[in-house]
Image: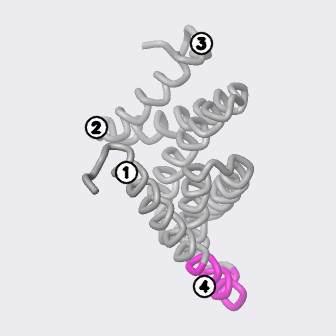
Amino acid sequence: EPLTDALIREVREEVQVDVEAGALVLVNDGIGKVEEALRTARGDQYAIFRLALLKWQKSSLLGFAGDRKGEKQFGQDARDGLKFLLKGHCDYPSERQVKRALAYLTGDLGLAAQLAGRDGDAVGYFRESAGIWNALASLEKENDEFREGLDWAKERLTELDALSVIERP
């Protein structure tokens, strides 16, 4: 039987589902291991950081699978973990690393909220992301990544008609 476009699409979709399911198993395993480690080393900053990153990854995977509730829950959990680290003194990971991750994460949460039709939430997340990128960019004026992150967040706010006159370039 010749390979038709429909058959190729069907195979790709099946492979994608298998890859996402396998990735979710690995992420869940990682979350379990880090949570277990945190039971004995409660304040380990690196473990808290890794747990936040794994929950962020799980949030993304759930979003790809269409589970908006799970996407929001695990994304919010990841955000809470990163914000927790910023409340104290960050040794390793550094405060810069945590803020950078939080800037990307809040951008992702904003995009997820926007795709789910929660524009009010999206605006809040994009503003948070823009604020973090702005703070990072002001510390490292020559850092293209930070300026581009700030520009991206501002573009999202413009799309939602939520960029104030003060924030416009």
| N-terminal-most mark, 4 or 2 | 4
Q: Which mark is residue 166?
A: none
Give the dominant element type of the magenta stretch: helix, strand or loop. Answer: helix
- Give the number of marks: 4
> Disc 1 designates what residue?
7
Horizontally, residue 138 falls left or right of residue 27, namely: left
Q: Position of residue 98 (x, y in %)?
A: 51, 57
Q: Position of residue 34 (x, y in %)?
A: 60, 81
| N-terminal-most mark, 2 or 3 | 2
> Disc 4 designates what residue?
33
Question: Marks 2 and 1: which is nearer the front?
Answer: 1
| N-terminal-most mark, 1 or 3 | 1
Residue range corresponding to the magenta coloring: 29-42
Horizontally, residue 5 falls left or right of residue 164, namely: left
Q: Position of residue 58 (x, y in %)?
A: 59, 62
Q: Which mark is residue 144?
A: 2
Task: Give me the C-alpha separation between circle 4 and circle 1.
Answer: 39 Å
**What is the three-letter code of the residue carrying label 2?**
Asp
**What is the three-letter code of the residue carrying label 3?**
Asp
